[in-house]
Amino acid sequence: MLDIYYHTLGINPGCSESEIRRRYLELVHKFSPEKNPEQFAKIHQAYENLKNPVATMDDILELSQNEDSIEQIIEVLVDELRQERLPTNMILNMGK
């Protein structure tokens, strides 16, 4: 799910928030919105999604409830946990 954003910025999934920000700023200087609006939009979208990939559990459910089965939703959650992009306490507090 987030892999495309990492690829867009040219970074590894395990990188820190400061590395994400540094790479974003490098690319923004390289691809200005005036000269490269499409590329800039992709870079900006990737940064926005990586700096705060999942705001709430509701975001995950909203994104996946339309077409995904419960197994696919769980797979996404487990993947997010493995990448340490989703706080564990968010999972523990589900349904409360």
Image: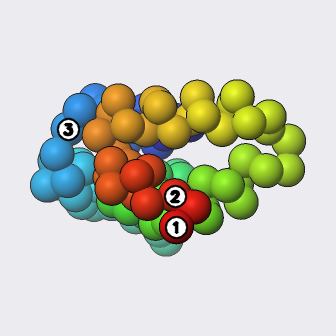
Which residue corresponds to the image point at 60% horizontal and 54% vertical from the top-left?
A: 60
Q: Residue furthest bottom?
A: 34
Q: Which mark is residue 96?
A: 1
Classed neighbour count for the residue bearing mark 3: other residues with Cα under 10 Å, few (<14), some (14–19), many (≥20):
few
**In the displayed structure, does residue 12 sit left or right of residue 8?**
left
Q: Which residue, given by chain and number where applicable, does mark 3 sit on?
A: 15
Q: Between disc 3 and disc 1, whose residue precedes?
A: 3
Q: Give the Cα separation between the discs numbered 2 and 1.
A: 6 Å
Q: Nearer the viewer, mark 3 or mark 1?
A: 1
Classed neighbour count for the residue bearing mark 2: other residues with Cα under 10 Å, few (<14), some (14–19), many (≥20):
few
Q: Which residue, given by chain and number where applicable, does mark 2 sit on?
A: 94
Residue 32 visible, this angle: yes
Residue flagged by tag 1: what amino acid is it?
A: Lys
Locate residue 9, reporting x and y percent: 36, 42
User: Which type of secondary structure does the marked residue at label 1 adopt?
Assistant: loop
Q: Give the Cα separation between the discs numbered 2 and 3.
A: 27 Å
Residue flagged by tag 3: what amino acid is it?
A: Cys
Q: How many marks?
A: 3
The one of 91 and 6 positioned closer to us in this rendering: 91
**In the displayed structure, does residue 57 sit left or right of residue 52?**
right
Do the residues bearing badges 2 and 1 touch, measured as CB atoms within 8 Å? yes
Which residue corresponds to the image point at 52% horizontal and 58% vertical from the top-left?
A: 94
User: Which type of secondary structure does the marked residue at label 2 adopt?
Assistant: loop
Which residue corresponds to the image point at 43% horizontal and 38% vertical from the top-left?
A: 80
Q: Is residue 16 above or below residue 53?
A: above
Look at the image and tell me in which quarter the N terminus lies. Answer: top right
Classed neighbour count for the residue bearing mark 1: other residues with Cα under 10 Å, few (<14), some (14–19), many (≥20):
few
Locate residue 69, reporting x and y percent: 80, 34
